[in-house]
């Protein structure tokens, strides 16, 4: 197998957050990407993750920002169609990388393994729609433990590639627009 045919993982500045280059096999018909294989992830030393308990596919038009949400569950995120700038913020009290922000350009074939309590968000950057895929190791529920911070917190330094009016509900939900800054979180 060539290196492009195997799963690869790169650590990031956030403890436990890894950028994955997915296994891909192509021919004249197109490409088959292996989005997740437990044994391959385990072989990379990322630990045993999965069994996925919920999988969501969100479609967003160009410029939409969703997040930053850090529920008490591990996530595997990517785009199935289009492109996005993913943003991740360590909001885990006591973490060695607390407050660090990482951005990743997402396209089909690149995924991010997001540990529990690290906030996840993105901006859809492709023309037309972007389909963002989330795998969760727990089922989401409204009362689950976690934290959320504003995607527009200036202290985080996230450079969204497309300008956003936070009052435009076609681009940012009212809930996300009202999220607190990281420094305003309790504890």
Image (cartoon, rainbow, N blue to C red):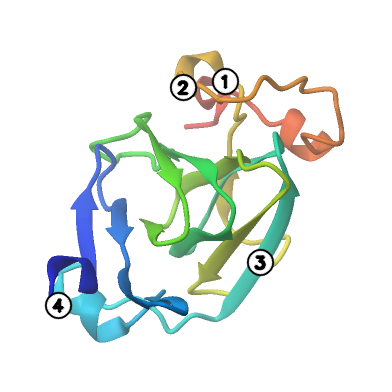
The answer to the question of whether label 2 and label 1 lie on touching residues, with beta carbons closer than 8 A, is yes
Q: CA distance from mark 3 to mark 1?
A: 26 Å
Residue on which disc 2 sits: 156
Residue situated furthest top in the rendering: 154
Q: Nearest to the eye among marks 2 and 4: give it.
A: 4
* Chain-order first, disc 3 or disc 2: 3
Which residue shows up at 21% across the image and 66% down it?
Answer: 4
Q: Nearest to the eye among marks 3 and 2: give it.
A: 3
The answer to the question of whether label 3 and label 4 lie on touching residues, with beta carbons closer than 8 A, is no
Residue on which disc 1 sits: 153
* Chain-order first, disc 2 or disc 4: 4
Q: Nearest to the eye among marks 3 and 1: give it.
A: 3
Residue 123: percent from left, percent from top = 61, 38
Q: Quadrant of the N terminus?
A: bottom left
Residue situated furthest front in the rendering: 28
Residue on which disc 3 sits: 57
Q: Residues within 10 Å of mark 2 (few under 14, many from 20)?
A: many
Residue 20: percent from left, percent from top = 30, 59
Residue 159: percent from left, percent from top = 50, 21
Q: CA distance from mark 2 to mark 1?
A: 6 Å
Q: Secondary structure at mark 2?
A: helix
Residue 6 in view in this figure: no
Above/below status of 72 relative to 54? above
Residue 131 in the figure: left or right of residue 11: right
Which residue shows up at 68% across the image and 41% down it?
Answer: 127
Q: CA distance from mark 2 to mark 4?
A: 33 Å
Residue 62 in the figure: left or right of residue 8: right
């Amino acid at each position: 197998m060539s290196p492009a045919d195997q799963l690869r993982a790169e650590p990031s500045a956030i403890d436990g957050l890894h950028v994955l280059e997915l296994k891909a096999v192509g021919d004249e018909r197109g490409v088959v990407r292996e989005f997740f294989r437990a044994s391959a992830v385990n072989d990379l030393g990322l630990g045993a993750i999965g069994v996925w308990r919920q999988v969501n596919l969100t479609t967003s038009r160009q410029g939409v920002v969703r997040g930053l949400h850090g529920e008490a569950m591990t996530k595997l995120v990517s785009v199935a169609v289009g492109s996005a700038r993913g943003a991740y913020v360590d909001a885990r009290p006591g973490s060695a990388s607390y407050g660090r922000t990482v951005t990743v350009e997402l396209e089909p074939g690149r995924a991010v393994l997001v540990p529990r309590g690290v906030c996840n968000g993105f901006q859809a950057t492709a023309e037309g729609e972007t389909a963002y895929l989330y795998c969760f190791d727990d089922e989401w529920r409204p009362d689950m433990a976690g934290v959320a911070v504003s995607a527009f917190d200036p202290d985080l330094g996230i450079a969204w590639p497309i300008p956003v009016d936070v009052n435009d509900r076609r681009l940012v939900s009212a809930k996300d627009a009202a999220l607190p800054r990281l420094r305003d979180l309790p504890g």
